[in-house]
Amino acid sequence: MIKNKVRQLWAEGKPALHGWLSIGNPFTAEIMAAQGYDAISIDWQHGALEYSDVLPMFQAMRASGVTIGARVPWLDPAAIMKALDAGAMQIICPMINTPEQAAEFVSYLRYPPHGQRSFGPTRAAYAQGGNIHVEANTEITGWAMVETKEAMANLDRIAATPGLDGIYVGPADLTFSLCDGKYPPGFDREEPEMIEALQTIVRTCQKHGIKAALHCGTAEYAARAIDWGFNMTTVSGDTRLLASAAAASVKAFRDAVSATATEATDDKGGY
């Protein structure tokens, strides 16, 4: 079975850079996968796509060698196992609020005797190579998303879940929930209470020997998060990158045209 490159980075004491896909298109996925990310996940929860989009996107990214993953829609064994059988090497599960839910999530990731994943790696058997039934339990990475006040109250027990690889922080929902709507949801939090919450998550993960990941909006904030101790950071995603690059291009054009018009007016002695 192929190796999980993110796990190899961690073994070397290095953090992982994670990309994010919300557009249901193999070509977009292929372009993103060619940019040098260590891992990329498809957002099956909030992305504009379905399972019929997920599998060809996995296929399009295979040649890049990037570690492929998915955020599943919910704590649903069918979705989790289908993503794994399609070739996912990491699964991010939203809204894990209790240790019981975390244990349930882990059980869907692992083959017996460590879980209840059903054997049928339809595409994974070809994309990941043989011996999956033996090696998948140690190569697949499972992330429980902590994004609510209830999850923070149960943080220590969630992090202690046997077989859980890490906690993935969704800062938008966590801020909305933890601060009772005081602040709007969003990435790259600067509120002191949110920074403390993020650092508490890192300390708790370190205490239990698991990894911590944070969804970020900018590379600069992601670098800060690595300095705090996060082991993987997501820097923006396809939709936001497309919008920001397009907006910058449009602005550059408008500014250039305006400058040219001003120069032409000045040359004619206009006012």
Image (tube, rainbow, N blue to C red):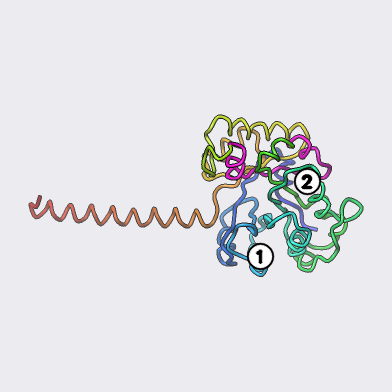
* Res. 103 visible in picture: yes
Mark 2 vs mark 1: which is more N-terminal?
Answer: 1
Question: Which kind of residue does numbered mark 2 sit on?
Answer: Ala
Question: Which kind of residue does numbered mark 1 sit on?
Answer: Val
Q: Please check the rendered image and state whether residue 170 is part of the magenta-colored stretch, yes or no.
A: yes
Q: Residue at x 68, y 50 (%)?
A: 94
Say the numbered circle drawn on residue 102.
2
Q: CA distance from mark 2 to mark 1?
A: 24 Å
Residue 139, percent across and down? 79, 51
* Tag 1 residue: 54
Q: Decide: few, some or many residues near mark 2? Use Cα within 10 Å; few <14, some 14-19, many ≥20.
A: many
Depicted 101 relative to depicted 26: above or below:
above
CB atoms at circles 2 and 1 under 8 Å apart? no
Q: Nearer the viewer, residue 101 or 59?
A: 101
Q: Secondary structure at mark 1?
A: helix
* Res. 68 visible in picture: no
Q: Residue at x 61, y 41 (%)?
A: 177
- The boundaries of the magenta stretch are 155-179
